[in-house]
Amino acid sequence: QLAAGSLAAGGTLGILIPPSVAMIIYAMVTQASLGRLFAAGIIPGILATLLYCLATSVWMHFNPKMGPAGPKTPWPERW
């Protein structure tokens, strides 16, 4: 449930965070400035991403069974 919800919520950010195909098509159809649309999507996109991360962290704090810890991976292997 946690993974499906995270993917569904994160998938909505693809429309908002530049460069988004939907934003480009919208700019072409409405003759709006693409640069202004991109600039208008950055802050809400970053804010939504941070709030999704915060909500998931709070959810996991109160219900840790939803996302059990996986095996530890050393930092060099992560990079």
Image (tube, helix red, strand yellow):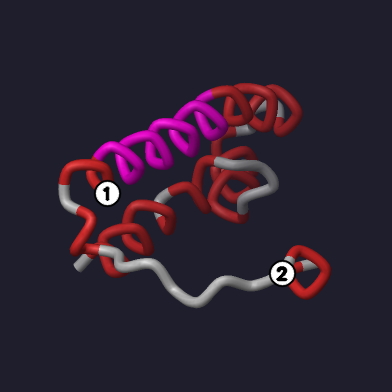
Residue assigned mark 2: 74
The C terminus: image quadrant: bottom right
| SS for dot 1 | helix
Q: Which percent across, then down, holds residue 6?
A: 34, 58
Mark closer to the chain start, 2 or 1? 1
Magenta residues? Answer: 44-58
Given residues 27 and 22, the one toward you in this image is 22
- Tag 1: residue type? Met
Residue drawn at (16%, 51%) of the image: 63
Amino acid type, callout 2? Pro
Q: Is residue 51 left or right of residue 65?
A: right
Q: Which residue is mark 1?
A: 60
Question: Is disc 2 placed on a helix, strand or loop?
Answer: loop
The rendered magenta stretch, by its main secondary structure, is classed as helix
Residue drawn at point x = 44 percent, y = 33 percent = 48
Tally of numbered discs = 2
x and y percentages locating residue 23 in the rendered image:
58, 44
Q: Quadrant of the N terminus?
A: bottom left
**Is disc 1 surrounded by few (<14), some (14 to 19) or many (20+) residues within 10 Å?**
some
**Residue at point 64%, 47% (across, down):** 24
Badge nearest the viewer, 2 or 1? 2
Is residue 57 found left or right of 50 in the rendered image? left
